[in-house]
Amino acid sequence: MDIEQIEIAEFLKRVAPFDALPGEEIEQLARQVDIAYFKAESSILMAEQPLSDLYIVRSGVVETFRRTGELYNRLSEGNFFAEQGLLRGRKAHFPAVSKSDTLLYLLPADVFDRLFETYEHFADYMEISEVERRQTRVVSASSGSDHELMTSPVASLLQRKLVMVSERLPVSQVAQRMSEHSVSSVLVVDSEQNPQALLGILTDRDIRNRLVAQRLPYSTPASDIMTTDLFTVAHDDYVFDAMLLMLRHNVHHLPVVNNGVPVGVIAISDLVQHEAKSSLYVVSSIFRQNSVAELAKLKADVRASFVRMVQQDANSHMIGSAMALIGRSFKQRLLELAEEQLGPPPIPYCFIALGSMAREEQLIVTDQDNAMILDDRYNEAEHGAYFLALAQFVCDGLDACGYPYCKGGIMATNNKWRQPRQVWHRYFQQWIKEPSAEGLLHSSIFFDVEGVWGEQHWVSALKREISGLAKTHIRFLASMVRNALLRTPPLGFFQDFIMETDGRQNKTLNIKRRGTAPAADLIRVHALASGCMQSNSFQRLKYLQKNAVLPKGKAEDLRDAYELIALTRIRHQALAIEQGEEPDNNVAPEQLSDFERRNLKRAFQVLSNAQKYLKFKYASIQ
């Protein structure tokens, strides 16, 4: 290969889903890729234009638009577009425009087809990638919250002067400029071709780890040690978006762009001064701990983070998302520690989250629901001991960190829930095609699933199969409907609360069992019946509203009711923590104000009506 092809190959090795292809396949692709250059504000694709290539962004920024002219997606280095058109009729679905000088790699359609047919992970990624990109907003725009996390743009955090350097500048001079401007990072740009083209970022950590520790000369150019695998955030995105991006990818600096042009950098130090700093502190701390004992010491920090978000009037979606990310981070760090202790896994695997963590609706009172998908080459005699030890390490660690063992045994330590891919596909096929009482017990947990570690694209393929099967199997949907109607809101005939009557919980409402859980159950049924692949209840409701699955206005009513019930549960738990008590899900109505009781009754009535509609909508299949 010539130098240009080597550069293309090295780039593809860093970009999903190409990074999982065999080395010889990537070398072949490098010889087949064409290169195209577009100046800023140039049209790349028109709607319905015939397609002959997959477009991969090498540098620059591309925006795609709906036919109405509304912005659909903003793409930067490593992103690709036109895959949906290639899969559906060979015509462009969305117009595409370069927002800055842009270099594209063009992968011929016939090569795309061959990869799609040959590599399952490639096909899975291409089929669901657009859906995933459209899930980047985790905050519901219609939530009605005026909390600062949701209303403050990222631009409000930009307090330092933007410092940009040439990729050719020696690191010694870069360090001098960082010192002069009192910044911990600089953006590296192409000084000759396009001074606004972002090539990478160079931080004080990069200088320490990649230059000083490696004993490289101080004359080393910035391009040699900069980070090129960048995550960026738009200047008008919300602070909460930036915070979750940092949490999910464990990054310490985020370049801020305006229409693809760099306008600043935000660092952890900027976010930690913001009101939502605690959740970021916790996640950052998790990845710095080197033992289970050290991780367990963070339990108090997790609770403090939860309470602080409640005090700041964050909505339930924001709190659930942040707490789920904290839980995911514990799992990820425990898996890292487990692999350090046990050695690298003998075959690929994926550790999965189930239930509330998968829905991003996790709170303080929660147990651990998890499982493990193993490569189909799994052999019990050769591999069983390793993965049992791995599962035991993680589940014991989670229990120590405040996530108790699942009483129902829904954990990766259970051999039944530590199985090869083909077995998991068989599980779901059986639950859907041959519904049973046991299968229904699993439906409220296993049908909310997300990957946490390892081959996470396996979960995407599994969810795609579930989505296709569930909506076409009437007996399964009928069983799911009956299951969703088992738990009803705690309202009597005269709209008075029906209290728990057992022991310590006497005269209280179990607001999870009789509130949030039945709401999540019925939302899940509508989602499965309509082919929705989302996991979060609010995102599912948004899908149901958009696709007119529910009568006009009912999705919004159910969303507001779910939010109020969830917030009542959240505030009850936060109050218990503040008072030094152990939080639970049992709310005493007498401790609520008249206003809170009235609105909670109204929310329960909305939930009750939603259950009646569920029964009516699917009456013909029951």
Image (spheres, rainbow, N blue to C red):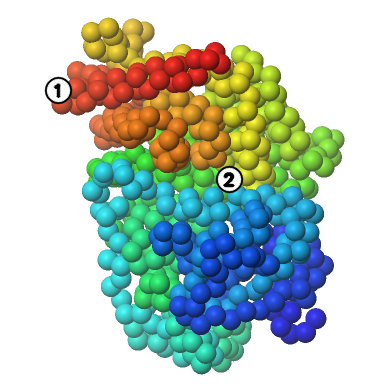
Q: Amino acid at mark 1?
A: Asp
Q: Which one is closest to the eye, mark 1 or mark 2?
A: 1
Residue 147 is left or right of residue 95, and the answer is: left
Residue 423: where, in percent of width, then height?
Answer: 75, 32
The residues bearing labels 1 and 2 have C-alpha atoms spaced at a distance of: 42 Å
**Residue 468 in view (yes/no):** yes
Of 144 and 452, the residue lying toward us:
144
Of 235 and 49, the residue lying toward us:
49
Residue 275 location, quadrant: bottom left
The residue shown at (56%, 36%) is 531
Quick one: SS at disc 2?
A: strand
Residue 417 is left or right of residue 234, and the answer is: right
Residue 372: where, in percent of width, then height?
Answer: 66, 37
Task: Write down the residue under mark 1.
Answer: 594
Is disc 1 surrounded by few (<14), some (14 to 19) or many (20+) residues within 10 Å? few
Disc 1 and disc 2 in contact, CB within 8 angstroms: no
Residue 360 is left or right of residue 596, and the answer is: right
Residue 565: where, in percent of width, then height?
Answer: 31, 28
Q: Amino acid at mark 2?
A: Val
Quick one: SS at disc 1?
A: helix
**Residue 358 in view (yes/no):** no
